[in-house]
Image (cartoon, coloured by chain):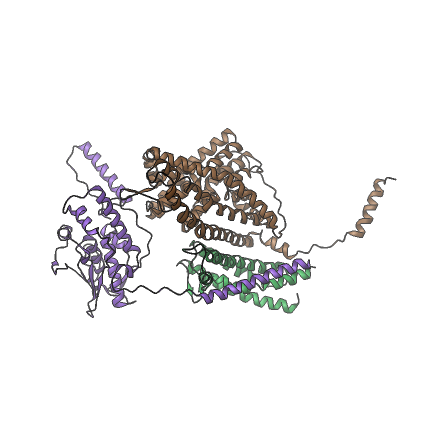
Amino acid sequence: MPLSVDERWDLIDKISKQTVTFGAYKHTLKDAIAELTVKPLTGIPVAIAVIYGFWSFFGDFAGTLFTDGFMVKLFDEHWLPWLQSVFPGGLGNPLYALMVDAGHIENGVLVASDTCFESFGVLTSGLFVPFGVVLWAVVAFYLMFAVLEDVGYLPRLAVLVDTILHKIGLHGYAIVPTFLSLGCNVPGVTAVRPLETRKQRFLMITLLSVFIPCGAQIGIMQDLVPELMGWIFLTLAIGYLGFGFILNKIVPGKSPEIVMDVPPYQMPMWRNIASKLWIRTSRFLLVAVPFVLLGCLIVGLMYLTGAMDWLAAVFGPLLMGWFGVPEETVAPLIAGFLRKDLAVGMIGGLMERGLMTTFQVFTSVVLLCIYFPCLATFVMMLKEENGKEFLGSIVSLVAMVFVYGGLIHLVGIMLGVA
Amino acid sequence: MKKEKSKMQSAKLPLKAVAIVALVLLALSSAVISVDAHMPRAKPLPEFELEPISIYDGDTLIDISIDDIGDYHGEICVCGGCAFRATQLGISKILGEEIPARDDIKIVSRLPTPGSRDCFQYITGTGPGIETKTKGEYKVILPDGTAVVNLSNKDLKKVSNDNTLDNFRFDVCRKSTGECFKVVLKLGVFSEDYFELRKKVKFDIPENATSEEKALFKSEWEDTRDKFLTSPDWVLFEGVEEPEEEEPDVVGGATFFSILVIGLILLVGLVYSRKKAS
Amino acid sequence: MDEGEAKLGRLYFAVLGAVALAFGAAELIASAGGGFTWGILDSSGAANPLFLPWRAIILLSAGFFYLSSVKDFAEVHQLAKSVMASIMIWIVAGMAIWSRIAGSIPGEETWFNTLDGFLASYAPPYCPEMFLLPFSLVIVYYILKEEEAEK
């Protein structure tokens, strides 16, 4: 016989009296630790330590162990010399220059390159950049990111940075696309979807595509200019917050609050981490490698046809006068439209040949970070924004590049280093 | 930094104004772009760390860096770099860690070039435009014993056209005690054809240099300059012993590594036992 | 945990906190001049010069956490501060050890390092955080005690 409503409630009371105990909730050690990592006074020093661990692991894994330890030897001491000896044509031959080694002029003579950074060939730089440098950087980044995600630390980081990000019209949640963009800008732009208003999405996409360098770029920077990394990131962070503040003031619209779930801390599940790592890394390689190869090919063709020299002559005065970088930076800037890691690698080649001062390297790398998103991000932006927003992003980008780039040059002149 | 001076022709008023504006712009641009009088468009300096030369000028302690020499001369060149390193070595050999007084330093150089002259004059306080309370001594005596009295650029150019490695010898002396250290540049610092190329490129002796020879000399000049900025003393000068390579501390490393391995085993054991218990 | 253990913990972490604070302050001041070396203690040699003051700030914070946890040490929120301080030291020391491991495996001219070269990579000097690491592990005892009490 079905129970009446009152009988049902009586049964519930009887069962709960036998099974449920009531009392004051006593904080466990885990709860207390969770609280500490969220309150600013204790949470910020912890965040500083966690981020230190993140970057330290990244630098040693990607740079010291794999790239400098094995990949440079493999590519520069075996792959490059072997290709230089077996590929038909030889130095000076157009196909050889395109595929293996463009060489460089020393004392009026064309000489072969010593490293895969300098060679700019599709089969040399084109393979060294993604497999020799970027792959390890991306693996290290996504590994640490997955660990932080699984442990439950990322939402707490979001709570900590919420107040600061409010000043630029965003919320703590923005740390998630920001962090993702440090791996690759494409998932970072995608992660903007949960933001409620168009203003927030526009702000986030514009700032990400300009001021957040991707893991590939960071990997190359770590390899070439580890001593400048801190300054580069500081400059980008200042730009991110400064221009974010300005954009927040001038872009119409609202930035409503976001509710985020902050899960309890837990031990990371290594199966989860392995699976996330595999998916993100393999997807990244599938997208990145073709673009790097294409980038090498296009840049090589432009050098061969003289188009690069023409562009250097046209844009050289602007680059030298306004940004304080040599006209040779034109080639990396063009390559940077396809792949920023390739572009930074090209700057490395210029640096190794002594064609740029330290400040010029710094300015060029920052310029590369901010001047235009890579093609993949560009496509993503087209997908996520409407026509007006996309145009707004591009206009903001151009303005930011000129203002910020010029400002960096001015500061350099005032400090006497430019 | 020496600013470029341009010749001004007399002109009518509007042309005069244009010329003045052009002159101002030229002066401003030369403040930004470093003008290399010796070697146009020389490649930028490499990364280097050179300790400054510390001396007492009266009671005042002065640190003279290679950049100070570069600013005084107009750039850091091969001879300036060599002179700086030679003085540094000489002082360290005679005085060790002690800091010399400026007026106690005497330098006899066999190198009649503006770069080394400016460096030695800056250090001894004997050059024009240097504010100093005390002065040391600086002489140029060629390898054949001829004393070069007139040290103007024009006069130095006359005597320096057949410079060789022999000219790169310097006596750094302590006047109060008479101690001297003879600094001699090692064979191999300059490339074999450096001085021949220099004669051709700078003095057209025996004939004008080709553009390839000019490019080659420029590259060798840059490499030699960089050597003086980055190489250790034992590579550059005679009489300096190569420091012994430190033996790696294998025992210390093995001890630490063992502690690390034991710690890791204990940690894994602890985690495993807790998992088993739960 | 009993009163004796709590008292011992209070004393121990007060001393450890003071030492961490002193090391952190020394590192921060020395980072302006590129770090310091004193016997087998070495606070220099980071690939990125910004890592030196960064590490120093973490050590200073850990020191403050330890010292602030001393009052009413047995209370869970105070114990949590000691745990966090220890975790911060583990992160920095752990990364210093990881850096040595990463540097010890590849050889200079050859693919892999020789045995001598491998072992020599772990030789002193060490950064201050590595010295504090074994002492910071004592907190594990108190964590296990607390978990027992929670059961």
Which image quarter holds the C terminus of chain B? bottom right
Name the one closer to the observer, B242 or A209.
B242
Q: Residue at the spot x=41%, y=46% of the render?
A: A79
Q: Which chain is green?
A: C
Q: Residue at the spot x=56%, y=58% of the render?
A: C87
Residue A392 % position (x, y)? 47, 32
Quarter assignment of residue A90: top left
Residue C103 % position (x, y)? 46, 56
Furthest residue toward right: A1
Q: Which chain is purple?
A: B
Left or right: B191 in relation to C34: left
Q: Is residue A311 visible?
A: no
Name the one closer to the observer, A244 or A125.
A125
In this rendering, is residue B216 above or below C74? above
Residue A68 % position (x, y)? 43, 51
Q: Colour of chain A?
A: brown
In this rendering, is residue A348 above or below B230? above
Q: How many marks?
A: 0
Left or right: A392 in relation to A160: left
Left or right: B172 in relation to C100: left
Q: Is residue B245 visible?
A: yes
Left or right: B103 in relation to A159: left
Residue A254 % position (x, y)? 55, 36
Furthest residue toward top: A387
Quarter assignment of residue C37: bottom left
